[in-house]
Amino acid sequence: MPELPEVETVRRSLERLIAGQTILTVDVREPRLRRTLAADFATALAGRVVQQIKRRGKYLHLCLDDNRIWLIHLGMTGQLVVGIVNGDLLPHDHVLIALSNGQSLRYHDTRRFGLMAIGNEEEIAALTALGVEPLSRIFTTDYLWAKTRTTRRTIKDLLMDQRVVAGIGNIYASELLFRAGIRPHRSAATLNRQATARIVKAAKAVLREAINHRGSSISDYLDGEGKPGAFQQRFRVYGREDESCRKCTTPIRRETRGGRSAFFCPVCQR
DNA sequence: CGCACCCCCTGCCGGC
DNA sequence: TGCCGGCAGGGGGTGC
């Protein structure tokens, strides 16, 4: 579910709600996430202070006072919600953390595609193997241009490759390519520099706009306070098959590749 | 070695 | 009403 804007929204919630808190207890109710949690997961966290919360791509880094990082990925349906838990647990509440301020941090994940791990900076970097941050200065036209020269993949696949750019998923790939006027399944190698520049600019603009609207909620996503995002109301193409293009009124099309849908306007995008 | 495919898991929705 | 297939913001392993 969550892509960069949703994860960034959760990060901001957590920064506000739990930064500086000490972890009192850790209750692992279901260790079988994407990878089964390590046997010492709970003991490694107990007693630690969560000093700050960072984000890298779609991953959260909860920085601990022993210089290690509690890495969290939300998969498709993961939620991290802070609040008071008084015994009323829901199905798929997999990890419960009691904090020194009396609040709880609850990890809920219906499909269990999420990931948690603990390690030092090097270990986490090796585990995640991420490319550049799309909102950083090093995500430039030159950078993406170089990547397009050496691949036979589609531009959508390239943008969704986390080793190339970290944080773009299926929703924002379609949305940003609409903004750039490029079809999702166009081969990346056919793009010229101008088109590449438009894509870089569109990526930054769409991600920033989505963060400003606190991300997109389709069915599962909630931020750290349990609130949905609002950007889904501004989708130009995602989930709008057969609905009319907001620019030219042509029906939006959906095309699947490898089980994933791409949405685009056949007139506005080439 | 890049890339297409299939799998992981649960829930929901539409069609028959 | 009930069952079945398709689909869903994720990533990883495999085999060509």
Image: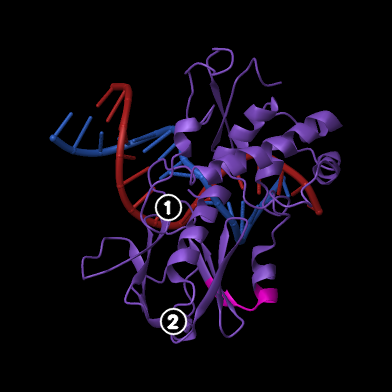
Chain colours: A purple, B red, C blue
Q: Closer to the camera: disc 1 or disc 2?
A: 2
Q: Which residue is mark 2?
A: A22
* Residue A40 coordinates in the image, percent (x, y): 47, 84
Numbered range of the magenta stretch: A117-123
Label 2, residues with CA under 10 Å away: few <14, some 14-19, many ≥20: many
Q: Nearer the viewer, residue A121 or A150?
A: A121
Give left or right: position of A264 versus A9.
right
Residue A150, can we see it? yes
Q: Would you identify the image quadrant in which residue A99 lies? A: bottom left
In the picture shown, does residue A45 fall above or below A34?
below
Q: Which residue is mark 1?
A: A77
Q: Which residue is at 73% across, 35% downward? A: A199
At label 1, the amino acid type is Thr
* Residue A21 coordinates in the image, percent (x, y): 44, 78
Q: Which residue is at 57% across, 40% downward? A: A209
Residue A246 among those drawn in magenta: no
Q: Quadrant of the C terminus of chain A?
A: top right
The chain identifier of the residue carrying mark 1 reads A
Which badge, 1 or 2, comes first in the chain's sequence?
A: 2
In the picture shown, does residue A168 fall above or below A32?
above
At label 2, the amino acid type is Thr
* Residue A267 coordinates in the image, percent (x, y): 64, 14
Mark 2 lies on a secondary structure that is loop
Tags 1 and 2 on a common chain: yes
* Residue A254 coordinates in the image, percent (x, y): 54, 25
